[in-house]
């Protein structure tokens, strides 16, 4: 796990460390500049080998201040550096102003206007590096007057000026992206083309939420984090649940004890749909078994018993034709988790099964059709409890929480914009249970405000996961982990992490059946 910070949290950390007297804001800015230059040289060793030409675009705040530091450091290494400033130098905040003045001893500063890039790119084809230090975590509203600068920077990088393609590095976050939401703060209806698209983004201390949410990763392309010496100042006065965690492969708690037996790892019951619609439940059941549930049973309607029996081996089969049968099955207290939804159906039987399952109060994963049933019946929705996990994709989320989804979809005119984390937290609070809101930026939130993200982004990008049945397997993974005793939130974020790892491990050509079977290899990689 690592933390993803908001702008306000980053500012609080920065202010606390400065107030402690251990470091000044100016020193932090210097470290930030060094961090960017170091990251650039590491990313492109040819740039480190000899001096080149760079253009540094500075904005009116401390992001611009970092830009002046970078310009100075490159100049000291023999680079030819041109610097542009958007805004009035006299209005720069103190540390940025100091670095502006230090730069002025080395070179000139020209005004950054809308048309700068056109003429600059025409006249400076040898430029190897463009530094985007226009706005960072302080961007709170769209900056219309520079919209052309951003889009021209993108075309330049794409080679539209005589084929010259400078590398673009964004300082902290691509200018235009809201650091708290990843939302591009642009003119309504403008395209993302007008957000800076970097080749590399260098953030400080921790990634911000905007690096993994919404359009942030499209702008950032690749994000690295520079250490600016704030490590022991993680989050003073910031309540732990306010800090969003990015799931990583550390401390997943997946090892099994040598002296355990199958029932110490729980018994999951996955309810199947009618004949002809049984594959999804079996995918979920296989996922639950592979991830380590001790026993998994598919509860099948009478009509589908033969169909299920012909395709199940290690997974058990029980006839659960309707709500009465489910009540009977639940007399077995060893069944500690239920999974409902994958191709369950949308008829009265299915609705009744969801109602009975929720009434049992056991750990319950609700996916697919079960989510649609919840969105149709407020009475059933009201039965959700803290042991449930909902796993909506964006369409299901819209049906379940239409007002929250509308707020998330509304074009953002100001920052911090309402984010997917905000939306998932609000949804979890309303539902009274854990919500896993799927996407490349899967957000998991619980009613008390805890939130984490599984990012299938950057080097973990897993486009082959967009395949039929992958969601059923994810529901099964969560089910299996809850059977093993994981709390709902932990089960959901660990399952989402492993789901992506399975896709990455299998690679191209992945179909849903491959996901559970990729788990042993993933476990081995994790040292299990
Ligand atoms: N935190 C740390 O530990 C460290 C932070 N560091 C660096 O500081 C950066 C944060 O600096 P920051 O707070 O000064 O914000 P920044 O992004 O430069 O912009 C704010 C300025 O832009 C203005 N402005 C905003 N929107 C606008 C618009 N649409 N159009 C026009 N103007 C607009 C806004 O004006 P205002 O809203 O006040 O009117 C204000 O003047 C951070 O990203 C990192 O790079 C590092 O040095 C090391 C340690
Ligand atoms: K920037």
Image (cartoon, rainbow, N blue to C red):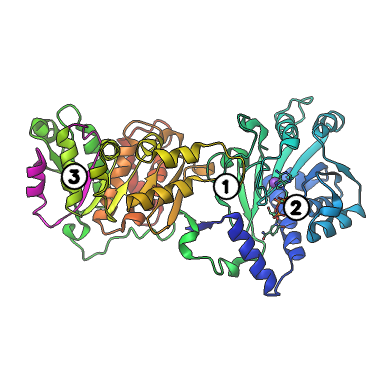
> Mark 1 sits on what residue?
210
Quarter of the figure with the C terminus: bottom left
Which residue is at a point 17% across and 57% down the rendered structure image? 262
Find out if the beta carbon at label 2 lies less than 8 Å from the nearest ligand 1 atom. yes
Gap in angstroms between the C-alphas marked 2 and 3: 55 Å
**Circles 1, 3 touching at the beta carbon (< 8 Å):** no
Q: Is residue 87 visible?
A: yes
Q: Within 10 angstroms of label 3, few (less than 14), some, or many (20 or more) residues?
A: many
**Location of residue 380 (image quadrant):** top left
Gap in angstroms between the C-alphas marked 1 and 3: 38 Å
| SS of the residue under disc 2 | loop
| SS of the residue under disc 1 | helix
Question: Residue 354 location in percent, x, y?
Answer: 20, 43
Question: Residue 56 location in percent, x, y?
Answer: 80, 44
> Mark 2 sits on what residue?
61
The range drawn in magenta is 318-347
Which residue is at a point 56% across and 39% down the rendered structure image? 215
> Mark 3 sits on what residue?
355
């Amino acid at each position: 796990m690592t933390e993803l910070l908001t702008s306000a949290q980053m500012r609080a950390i920065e202010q606390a460390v400065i107030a402690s007297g251990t470091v000044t804001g100016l020193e932090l800015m210097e470290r930030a500049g060094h961090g960017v230059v170091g990251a650039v040289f590491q990313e492109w060793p040819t740039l480190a080998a000899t001096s080149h030409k760079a253009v540094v675009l500075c904005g009116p705040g401390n992001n611009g201040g970092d830009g002046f530091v970078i310009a100075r450091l490159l100049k000291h290494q023999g680079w030819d550096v041109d610097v542009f400033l958007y805004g009035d130098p006299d209005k720069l905040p103190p540390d940025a102003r100091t670095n502006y003045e230090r730069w002025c001893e080395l070179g000139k500063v020209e005004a950054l206007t809308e048309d700068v890039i056109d003429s600059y790119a025409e006249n400076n084809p040898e430029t190897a590096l463009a530094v985007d230090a226009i706005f960072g975590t302080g961007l709170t509203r769209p900056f219309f007057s520079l919209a052309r600068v951003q889009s021209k920077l993108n075309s330049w990088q794409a080679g539209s000026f005589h084929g010259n393609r400078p590398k673009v590095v964004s300082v902290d976050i691509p200018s235009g992206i809201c650091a708290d939401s990843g939302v591009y703060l642009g003119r309504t209806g403008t395209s993302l083309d007008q957000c800076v698209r970097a080749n590399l983004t260098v953030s400080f201390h921790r990634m911000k939420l905007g690096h993994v949410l919404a359009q942030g990763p499209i702008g950032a392309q690749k994000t690295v984090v520079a250490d600016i010496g704030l490590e022991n100042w993680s989050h003073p006065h910031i309540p732990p649940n306010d800090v969003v965690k990015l799931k990583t492969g550390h401390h997943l708690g997946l090892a099994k004890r040598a002296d355990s037996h199958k029932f110490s790892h729980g018994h999951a019951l996955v309810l199947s749909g009618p004949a002809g619609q049984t594959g999804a439940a079996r995918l979920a059941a296989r996922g639950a078994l592979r991830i380590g549930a001790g026993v998994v049973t598919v509860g099948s309607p009478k009509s589908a018993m033969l169909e299920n029996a012909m395709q199940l081996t290690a997974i058990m089969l029980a006839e659960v034709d309707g709500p009465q049968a489910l009540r009977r099955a639940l007399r077995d207290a060893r069944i500690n988790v239920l999974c409902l939804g994958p191709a369950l159906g949308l008829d009265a039987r299915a609705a009744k099964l969801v109602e009975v399952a929720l009434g049992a109060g056991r750990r319950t994963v609700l996916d697919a059709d079960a989510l649609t049933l919840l969105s149709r019946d407020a009475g059933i929705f009201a039965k959700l409890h803290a042991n449930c996990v909902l796993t909506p994709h964006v369409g299901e989320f819209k049906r379940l929480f239409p007002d929250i989804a509308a707020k998330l979809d509304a074009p953002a005119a100001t920052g911090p914009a309402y984010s997917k984390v905000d939306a998932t937290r609000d949804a979890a609070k309303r539902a009274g249970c854990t919500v896993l809101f799927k996407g490349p930026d899967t957000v998991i939130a619980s009613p008390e405000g805890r939130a984490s993200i599984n990012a299938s982004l950057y080097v973990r990008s897993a486009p082959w996961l967009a395949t039929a049945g992958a969601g059923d397997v994810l529901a099964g993974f969560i089910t299996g982990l809850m059977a093993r005793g994981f709390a709902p939130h932990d089960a959901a974020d660990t399952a989402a992490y492993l789901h992506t790892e399975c896709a990455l491990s299998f690679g191209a050509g992945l179909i849903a059946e491959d996901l559970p079977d990729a788990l042993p290899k993933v476990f081995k990689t994790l040292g299990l």
